[in-house]
Image: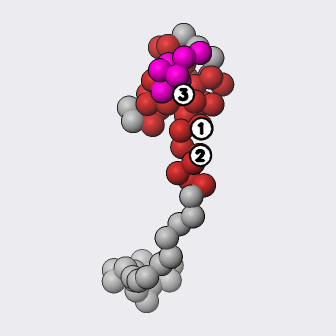
Amino acid sequence: MTVRLRSELADAVADQHRCVAEAAAYYGVGWATVHNAFKARVDPPLAAPLPSVRVLGIDETRRGKTGLDP
């Protein structure tokens, strides 16, 4: 498989918001092939450490409500 095809498969899922099965059918490859291309694209950014929280806000519309109030 070429680097270009692998990139197209990952783009179809990540950028075009197509499901893995749809992209696999469109490009004529297996589901696992598309999934692996997508996973290879998103794993590095997801594995990066998150920045530390500097400010934590409270949603004013929910403050003091338990979730059981009507």
Question: What crowding class fits label 2: few (fewer than 14 Cα within 10 Å), some (14-19), or many (20 or more)?
Answer: few
> In front of the other: label 3 or label 1?
1
Residue 59 picture quarter: bottom left
Q: Quadrant of the N terminus?
A: top right
Mark 2 lies on a secondary structure that is helix
- Residue corresponding to mark 2: 43
Residue at 47% x, 78% y is: 53
Q: Tell me, yes or no, whether the two marked residues, 1 and 2, touch with CB atoms within 8 Å.
A: yes
Question: What crowding class fits label 1: few (fewer than 14 Cα within 10 Å), some (14-19), or many (20 or more)?
Answer: few
Residue 16 in view? yes
- Residue corresponding to mark 1: 39
Q: Which mark is residue 20?
A: 3
Query: In the rendered structure, which disc, 2 or 3, sits on the residue that comes first in sequence?
Result: 3
Mark 1 lies on a secondary structure that is helix
Residue 46 lies, in percent from the top left, at 56, 53
Going by the numbered disc 3, the residue's amino acid type is: Val
Q: Check the image and name the residue furthest to the top.
A: 28
Q: Check the image and name the residue furthest to the left.
A: 60
3 up-or-down from 13: above or below: above
Going by the numbered disc 2, the residue's amino acid type is: Asp
Of residue 12 and residue 43, the one placed in the foreground of this image is 43
Q: CA distance from mark 3 to mark 1?
A: 11 Å
Query: In the rendered structure, which disc, 3 or 1, sits on the residue that comes first in sequence?
Result: 3
Q: Check the image and name the residue furthest to the bottom.
A: 64
Mark 3 lies on a secondary structure that is helix
Of residue 69 and residue 61, the one placed in the foreground of this image is 61
Segment colored magenta = 1-7
Q: CA distance from mark 1 to mark 2?
A: 6 Å
